[in-house]
């Protein structure tokens, strides 16, 4: 898996994921808040399956 999620994108995914999970854990939002696990994991891993499928990358090229 080649990383396809860049720095700002990763940071936002992790932040949004954590916020959604926290809101779900405190009962502020419904069960759907647990879907925050998805952006959290893609942010931590640095790879997003839909990005790979469509050939999108927010990583800066090295070279």
Image: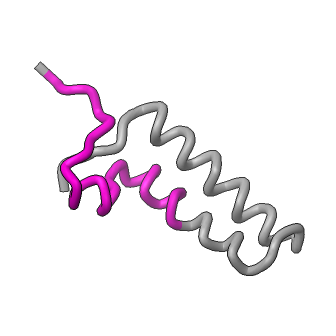
| Viewer-nearest residue: 40 or 55 | 55
Coloration mode: one colour
Q: Which residue lies furthest to the top in this view?
A: 63
Horizontal relation, residue 35 to residue 10: left or right? right
Picture layout, residue 15 above or below residue 53 = above
Q: Residue furthest front?
A: 54
> Which residue is found at the position 80% from the left and 63% from the top?
23
Q: In which quadrant of the rendered image does the C terminus lie?
A: top left
**Residue 40 in the image, given as x and y percentages of width and height:** 53, 57
> Which residue is found at the position 42% from the left and 57% from the top?
42
Q: What stretch is highlighted in magenta?
A: 38-62
- Residue 42, magenta (yes or no): yes
Picture layout, residue 55 above or below residue 28 = above
> Which residue is found at the position 64% from the left and 50% from the top?
16
Q: Residue furthest left?
A: 63
- Residue 52, magenta (yes or no): yes
Horizontal relation, residue 47 to residue 11: left or right? left
**Residue 29 in the image, given as x and y percentages of width and height:** 82, 70
């Amino acid at each position: 898996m080649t990383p396809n999620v860049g720095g700002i994108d990763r940071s936002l995914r992790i932040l949004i994921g954590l916020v959604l999970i926290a809101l779900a854990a405190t009962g502020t939002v419904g069960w759907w808040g647990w879907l925050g696990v998805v952006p959290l994991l893609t942010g931590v891993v640095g790879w997003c399956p839909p990005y790979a499928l469509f050939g999108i990358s927010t990583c800066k090229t090295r070279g």
